[in-house]
Image (cartoon, grey):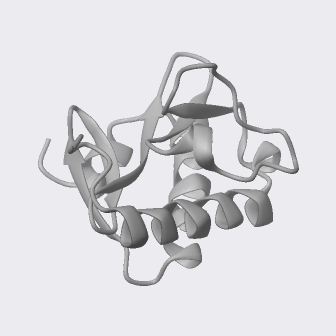
């Protein structure tokens, strides 16, 4: 699978629509964000990975590399690690677009300020 479009095309209709809604929110939040398929999933980069999109059997997730550092007033992020957090979505209607966009903007700003989150040091 070489492109995000191919990844999405391979999903069942219900999960594809949810994933497409998430992709649209990510792209609209940060116009300069680059997308590619890495680690078997769509990954969106600004000075390193910001967020990944993955489809599962009954939901799609967004995983933020700097999730533990993000402001999340809507409480959509899950997890308790020292860095990453994820959010689960079961339908396009369940995607809180403004909250997702705010998380993406904040995560991209942190990458610009702090550098690539995959490079420790």
Q: Residue furthest front?
A: 121
Q: Position of residue 81 (x, y in %)?
A: 54, 20
Residue drawn at 25 percent across, 49 percent down = 6
Displayed quadrant of residue 36 = bottom left
Outermost residue toward the left in this view: 2
- Using the image as rendered, state which of residue 44 and residue 80 is in the foreground: 80
At x 75%, y 49%, the residue is 95
Total marks placed: 0
Residue 97, compared with residue 69, is above or below; it is: below
Above or below for 62 versus 101 = above
Task: From the viewer's perspective, tell me whether residue 10 is left or right of residue 26.
Answer: left
| Residue 67, image x, y percentages | 57, 41
Name the outermost residue toward the right: 74
Asked whether the viewer can see residue 18, the reply is: no
Quarter of the image where the C terminus is located: top left
Depth order, front residue of 79/13: 79
Q: Nearer the viewer, residue 60 or 85?
A: 85
Q: Please give the name of the residue rendered at 84% of the width and 39% of the height, measured from the top-left corner.
A: 75
Q: Position of residue 103 (x, y in %)?
A: 65, 58
Is 57 rendered above or below residue 3?
above
Residue 30 appearing in the image: yes
Q: Is residue 70 left or right of residue 13?
A: right
Q: Quadrant of the N terminus?
A: top left
Q: Is residue 80 left or right of residue 49?
A: right
Report the residue that reaches farthest toward the bottom: 31
Residue 112 picture quarter? bottom left
Instruction: Choose top left, top right, bottom left or bottom right for residue 40.
Output: top left
Which of the two residues, 109 or 88, is positioned nearer the viewer here? 109
| Residue occupying the point 66% across, 66% down | 101
Determine whether, in the image, residue 67 is placed left or right of residue 54. Answer: right
């Amino acid at each position: 699978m070489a492109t995000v479009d191919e990844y999405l095309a391979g999903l069942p209709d219900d999960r594809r629509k949810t994933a497409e809604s998430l992709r649209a929110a990510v792209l609209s939040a940060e116009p300069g964000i680059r997308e590619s398929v890495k680690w078997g999933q769509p990954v969106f980069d600004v000075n390193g990975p910001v967020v990944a999109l993955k489809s599962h059997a009954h939901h799609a997730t967004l995983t933020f590399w700097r999730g533990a550092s993000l402001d999340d007033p809507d409480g959509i992020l899950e997890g308790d690690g020292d860095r990453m957090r994820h959010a689960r979505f079961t339908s396009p209607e369940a995607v809180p677009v403004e909250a997702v966009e705010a998380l993406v903007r904040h995560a991209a700003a942190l990458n610009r300020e702090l550098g690539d989150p995959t490079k420790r040091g």
